[in-house]
Image (cartoon, coloured by chain):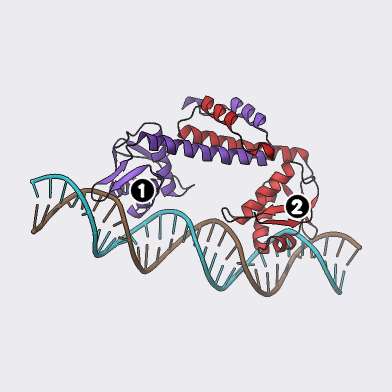
Chain colours: A red, B purple, C brown, D cyan
Amino acid sequence: MDERRVGSLSFRIDYSQPIYEQIVQQFQSSVVKGEIERGSKIPSVRELAQALHVTPNTVMHAYQEMERSGLTETRRGQGTFITSSQEQIEQLRTKLADVAIQQFMQRMSDLGYSKRDILRLIEANERDEER
Amino acid sequence: MDERRVGSLSFRIDYSQPIYEQIVQQFQSSVVKGEIERGSKIPSVRELAQALHVTPNTVMHAYQEMERSGLTETRRGQGTFITSSQEQIEQLRTKLADVAIQQFMQRMSDLGYSKRDILRLIEANERDEER
DNA sequence: AGCGGTGTATCACATGTTATGATACACCCA
DNA sequence: TGGGTGTATCATAACATGTGATACACCGCT
């Protein structure tokens, strides 16, 4: 578990997925769970790049995706900020959850599981209760 | 949607995902749902390649993955066959479902949804009831 | 023994994604 | 004006994916 800290943030990066996507997802999580206040400034491209031991271009890629999705607002010369719109955040959270659910339900359906089966399996699923 | 048939099988291939993975998944689905009998022969590498308009190498890639996972048995000079072990198939189905569930639950947890939230959302989810 | 249908291996090649490393430019604020 | 921002653009590399082609290994059948 290679964990890297920058300011109050903590990042865990592996090689199972594109780095820039992991950065995006970890910001999404942190914001949606309220670990980062809305409107707050996040590390600069160069700062985060240095902390994560990747190139600024990779962080840039992540930041551009975050802006496209409405998670952040970037102000040239000032920095990148989490959107101050609570509604925007809620919308994003709902949308991401919906995508996850649709994909999951499709996959399970392809494997021949009914909705009732799925509900039963999830109820039986014990694992990350301690998180 | 671009549908291609070969024998009694039907394939739908797009460009959102690697072709060989789509082939694997569609065989998994068909077998697990009983649409292909266990022990039965599936199309030869060349035959399926021609039907799907891809190169034999791509189909080969898929067939090798299927054998690695235990879904098929290949007999050189004879062809590729769905495993005749019902237990093998059940194990595979369970394993694939488990992976899907764990990933899904992790993702939803990252988005700040509790198990109770998730159950509620799935119960409310109407989509592929008509399939 | 030979033929035809199988799976298999190995090239060369092309394309797209991901990531690095470097450089330069544009913008904002103190 | 300087220093910190985001941004754009190169060149380069590694890897995954897919194509196209060729050759080989194996099996069952006649």
Label 2 element class: strand
Task: Name the residue rendered at 33%, 39% in the picture.
Answer: B83
**Residue B30 shows in this picture:** no
Decide which of A29, D22 is in the foreground and name it.
A29
Q: Pinpoint residue B52: horizontal percent, then vertical percent.
A: 35, 46
Q: Answer above or below: position of D11 versus B9.
A: below
| Whether residue A101 is situated above or below residue D11 in the rendered picture | above
Chain where mark 2 sits: A
How crowded pointer 2 is (Cα within 10 Å; few <14, some 14-19, many 20+) is rated as some
State the quadrant of the C terminus of chain A.
top right
Q: Quadrant of residue C21?
A: bottom right
Which quadrant of the rendered structure holds the N terminus of chain A?
Answer: bottom right
The residue lying at 53 percent from left, 24 percent from top is A116
Could you say which quadrant of the image residue B32 lies in? top left
Name the chain letter of the residue that bears numbered label 1.
B
State the image coordinates of residue B94 (x, y, percent, origin top left).
47, 36
Q: Which residue is mark 1?
A: B63
Mark 2, residue position: A9
